[in-house]
């Protein structure tokens, strides 16, 4: 049960956003532009994968399942495939560019100062642009916020992973801006 | 700014959390921000938000440095001490915050909104600090630069700077 009385039964960050709509608004707008805006050379599935991976590293059950389901939806695979990528991305069949970006995301999860010049150079060598590196760092940093918000207030999360997979198509269609209005 | 499209919302998050409605004073929120940034070893965020807090604290500006040293031996309220303890846990991980931390904050007078706002401010600085340092952005060395920055942050709040054409 959440540490504070949220006055609603919604799980994870949704419960927090219903409780505090003023703060929910810019948080949702940030999620929307980072994960879903079409003006981005990283695919939606790739951006969701970065979010799912960082949430997994932060051990945030709600966020890792929501965003693994979203990544799976866009990449047309099941959550289990995303879980395998998350746990050992170097041995998965994602692109070298995505591998280099996930490595940067993992460093961001530890701390901003953990990102090295070598990592960034290696990522550029396999084709990542400055903006892709920028967005990877910001997505990883944003999930270090979302995960702490969700777990720091001890919100509840459905244990059944199918719940997350079932919700993904609608979230993909409707986006994050209106995620708490329905 | 490299990417104003995302910057806009980052400013809005800072403005809402640090200047929007909250039971916590602006000075208390800036202190939480500086305290978390210090733990994340992010010099830019720590110095700028500490400067904003000192500006807001006026005669009590030394409180800022006292809590960076050790909140428990500072003169801030017991409620603030308990909230800084929660912020420090959030800085490590959301999962570090325990029922006992929450109970202690309530006993010291914190309500649900105080706790909510503290957790979200600490979480957001876990983002801002990583963003600033993850891209190795420029960090001014001169202390006076931060003092001016702090005054500006108090007078003007947080909004996207006008873009140079």
Image (spheres, coloured by chain):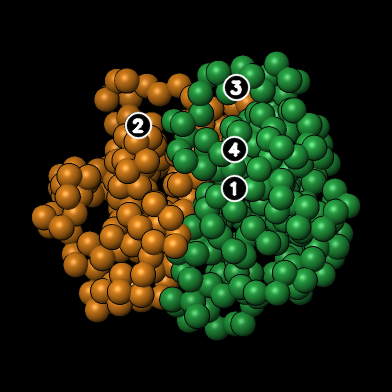
**In the figure, the orange chain has which letter?**
B
**Residue B25 sits above or below residue A159 on the image:** above
Is B148 placed left or right of A125 in the picture?
A: left
The mark nearer the N terminus, 3 or 4, is: 4
**In the figure, the green chain has which letter?**
A
Can residue A132 be seen from the camera position used here? yes
Comparing A182 with A102, the one in front is: A102
The mark lying in front, picked from 4 and 2, is 4
CB under 8 Å between discs 1 and 4:
yes
Q: Position of residue A35 (x, y in %)?
A: 73, 47
What residue is shown at x 63% (from left), y 26% (from top)? B2
Question: Label 1 lies in what chain?
Answer: A
**Residue A12 sits above or below residue A102 on the image:** below
- Same chain for mark 3 and mark 1? The answer is yes
What residue is shown at x 60% (from left), y 22% (from top)? A120
**Residue denoted by label 2:** B43
**Residue denoted by label 4:** A105
C-alpha separation, residue under disc 1 versus residue under disc 2:
24 Å
- Same chain for mark 4 and mark 2? The answer is no
C-alpha separation, residue under disc 2 versus residue under disc 3:
22 Å
């Amino acid at each position: 049960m959440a540490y504070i009385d949220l006055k609603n039964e919604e799980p994870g960050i949704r419960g927090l956003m219903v409780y505090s709509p003023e703060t929910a608004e810019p948080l949702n707008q940030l999620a929307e532009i980072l994960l879903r805006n079409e003006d981005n050379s990283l695919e939606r599935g790739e951006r969701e994968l970065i979010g799912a991976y960082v949430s997994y590293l932060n051990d945030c059950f709600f966020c890792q399942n929501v965003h693994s389901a979203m990544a799976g939806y866009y990449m047309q695979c099941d959550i289990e495939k995303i879980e395998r990528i998350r746990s050992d991305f170097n041995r998965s069949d994602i692109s070298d560019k995505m591998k280099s970006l996930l490595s940067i995301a993992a460093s961001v999860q530890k701390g901003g100062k953990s990102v090295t010049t070598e990592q960034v150079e290696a990522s550029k060598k396999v084709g990542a642009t400055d903006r892709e590196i920028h967005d990877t760092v910001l997505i990883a940093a944003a999930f270090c916020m979302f995960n702490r918000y969700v777990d720091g207030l001890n919100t509840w999360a459905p244990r059944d992973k199918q719940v997350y997979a079932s919700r993904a198509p609608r979230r993909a269609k409707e986006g994050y801006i209106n995620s708490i209005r329905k | 700014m490299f990417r104003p499209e995302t910057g806009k919302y980052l400013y809005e998050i800072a403005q809402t959390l640090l200047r929007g409605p909250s039971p916590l004073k602006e000075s208390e929120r800036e202190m939480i921000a500086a305290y978390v940034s210090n733990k994340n070893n992010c010099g830019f965020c720590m110095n700028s938000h500490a400067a904003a807090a000192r500006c807001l604290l006026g005669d009590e500006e030394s409180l800022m440095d006292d809590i960076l040293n050790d909140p428990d031996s500072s003169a801030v309220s017991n409620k603030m001490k308990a909230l800084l303890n929660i912020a420090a846990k959030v800085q490590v991980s959301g999962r570090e915050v325990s029922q006992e931390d929450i109970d202690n904050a309530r006993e010291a007078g914190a309500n649900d909104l105080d706790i909510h706002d503290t957790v979200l401010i600490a979480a957001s600085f876990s983002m801002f600090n990583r963003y600033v340092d993850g891209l190795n952005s420029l960090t001014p060395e001169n202390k006076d630069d931060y003092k001016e920055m702090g005054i500006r942050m108090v007078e003007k709040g947080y909004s996207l700077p006008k873009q140079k054409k």
